[in-house]
Amino acid sequence: MAKEKRQYLKKGKRLLSEGKMQQALIELKKAEDENDIYPDLYNSMGLAYSLLGQYDDAVKSFRKALELNTNYIEAHLNLALTLNNIGEVEEAKREFEIVGTLERAKGGDIGFSVKAKLANAHKSLGQLYYEIGKYDEAITELEKALKLTPDFKDISTFLGKIYIDKGNYAEAIKVLERVFEKHPDYVDCAVRLGIAYFKKGDLSKAKKIWFEAKRFNPNNEKLNFYLGLLERKQ
């Protein structure tokens, strides 16, 4: 890539990091050169388009980057996340799998930043499955996420919620108790765990959980609502 074109690319990436997407695209387009095509340029353009909500253009740019370098992990990952955003679940899953394969081929374990992105992507896929009522598929995606990042409490809590919705209160309690033990101040988990015990018929345990969480969050409306509900129930 010619020096002038490299400067445009550098400036475009800087603007991208500053959140100035439109300006970044202007500079990145200046860096295009039919005689010297650079994968990083199209990956950066894809990011800009994606963050602007121009997903079709983003997908085209990421695919262009991958045409130039099929082993470009970041472009595969960005393509997967973009496909996931537009509901192309199966295509997104294939891209996630490619990322994992490429990372393992490099030797050693997948880096934490990639694990975190993959985990959140699996969570997003799980959310899509959940929203259309495919609970088992949602659970599968969340379990994949937790294998990558077992300490992500929001993912475990979401998994517990799905088990509750399926009526599997014992499994929900098992998942949520692990989170609550480490994070008794995490309201979302406490609320879900209490609901699981409540639905199972163990009102005293539900009350204990909600009161414990209330010590850390005395004015939380959800906790106060459920404790009030419990008072009326008893």
Image: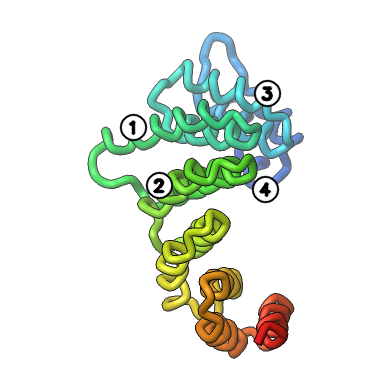
Q: Which residue is mark 4?
A: 18
Q: Nearer the viewer, mark 1 or mark 2?
A: 2
Choose the circle earlier in sequence order: 2 or 4.
4
Calculate the distance from the C-alpha at mark 1 to the C-alpha at mark 2.
17 Å
Considering depth in this image, is 52 or 225 the residue closer to the camera?
Answer: 225
Q: Which residue is mark 1?
A: 102
Q: Residue at x 55, y 41 (%)?
A: 134
Q: Nearer the viewer, mark 2 or mark 4?
A: 2
Choose the circle earlier in sequence order: 4 or 3.
4
Q: Which residue is mark 3?
A: 57
Q: Residue at x 38, y 51 (%)?
A: 148
Q: Is residue 45 above or below residue 172?
A: above
Q: Which residue is mark 2?
A: 144
Q: Quadrant of residue 97?
A: top left
Calculate the distance from the C-alpha at mark 2 to the C-alpha at mark 4.
33 Å
Q: Is residue 155 above or below residue 200?
A: above
Instruction: Return the x and y of residue 153 as percentages of the image width and height.
Output: 49, 64
Disc 1: CA contacts within 10 A as few (<14), some (14-19) or many (>=20): some
Q: Are marks 3 and 1 in contact (CB under 8 Å)?
A: no
| Kind of residue sitting beneath label 2 | Lys
Q: Secondary structure at mark 2?
A: helix
Q: Residue at x 57, y 85 (%)?
A: 207
Choose the circle earlier in sequence order: 1 or 4.
4
Q: Secondary structure at mark 3?
A: helix
Q: Is residue 3 above or below residue 160?
A: above
Calculate the distance from the C-alpha at mark 3 to the C-alpha at mark 1.
25 Å
Considering depth in this image, is 167 or 40 the residue closer to the camera?
Answer: 167
| Kind of residue sitting beneath label 4 | Glu
Choose the circle earlier in sequence order: 3 or 2.
3
